[in-house]
Image: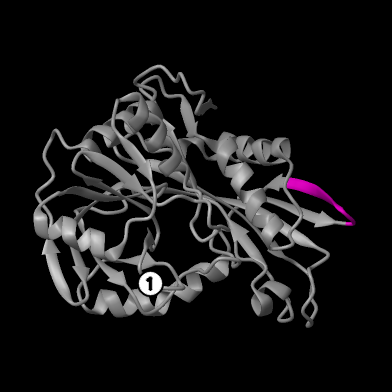
Amino acid sequence: MFVADYIDGEWQNPMVVPYAPLQLNPANATLHYGQSVFEGLKAYRNEDGEILVFRGDANQQRLNESAKRMCIPEVPKEFFMEGMRELLKVDREWVPEQAGCSLYLRPFVFAADDYLGIRPSKKYKFMILASPVGKYYAKPVAVKVETRFARAIEGGTGAAKAAGNYAGSLYPALKAQKDGYDQLLWTDGKSHQYIEESGTMNVMFVIDGVLITAPTTTGTILKGITRDSILTLAKEMGMPVEERFLTVIELEEALNSGKLEEAFGTGTAATVAFIRLINIHGKDYDLPDVSPNAFSVQILEALDNIKYGKVPDKYNWIMKY
């Protein structure tokens, strides 16, 4: 794992060390006040044995956007990239060769002050972990529209990849899982009328041949890197795209009329997660089986071809190691 410290106003002591438990003071500020942000990205192995990292620069930028919101010092781009580079030198043999598999990288920053009191920490630790992974979802998922609990509100931390955002979502997500659903579809925290995102993913819908996904302008939705990649490729493929909020009523009407052709989640962990069922106000709606010609299938293939180096990288999304 890669480890570095923020002391006296600068990042220092970068090193790659064996994976091991951390020793933390019981008064560590993160344990009490949650001043922590993280990222997730993946490294892939191409047919020539090269290691390819997908859009690592975008993850570095988003980490710093999250850090700014949580009063955490930014990690300089070259410091971030060099840390990832050095870790991959050591762990490159852990990058799987099998199709659909990758090495998951988890950069994160947390407060390191040993102090009880609500204030920004003066010391921090930046780390990157690595772990081989397979497919996040082995089959299409069932989701439930959440209209009671809220993941984020305008003015809050919804756009930051902050640790506490995920802790706050666990209770309603667990309730949904006990009822047989894999994930929630979160609605806006004010009116619960507008679909925002899923538990670990942005979410997209194909209605009447148009790709619809919520905008990231309200500060309540994570600026998904997979989401951004899909929108870029969709426009290139000639797919009509609308970045707007879909209402729960509109979603229900599209399900009843058969105009909802596809629904899927997007994110680093899953890339594309096909949705097979949506529950709205206690009623289950089955979606059509995903066909080989579905947009979600095509876009997943297009993304995988880029990630595994099977096609030219005209967007400069790939970094080779």
Left or right of residue 291, residue 74 in this image: right
- Residue 198 to residue 300: above or below: below
- Residue 123 to residue 149: above or below: above
Q: Nearer the viewer, residue 160 or 150?
A: 150
Identified by mark 1, the residue type is: His
Picture quadrant of residue 194: bottom left
Q: What's the magenta bit mostly, secondary-structure-wise?
A: strand
Residue under the image location 15 percent in, 58 percent down? 255
Q: Nearer the viewer, residue 295 or 120?
A: 295
- Residue 298 to residue 290: above or below: above
Secondary structure of the residue carrying numbered label 1: loop
Magenta residues span 8-14
Q: Which residue is labeled 1 in the image?
A: 192
Estimate the x, y position of residue 301 in percent, counting from the top left.
27, 32
In this rendering, the count of numbered labels is 1
Residue under the image location 60 percent in, 47 percent down? 62
Q: Residue extending furthest right?
A: 8
Inspect this view and state whether residue 132 appears. Answer: yes
Estimate the x, y position of residue 304 in percent, counting from the top left.
33, 32
Picture quadrant of residue 85: top right
Whether 169 is among the magenta residues is no
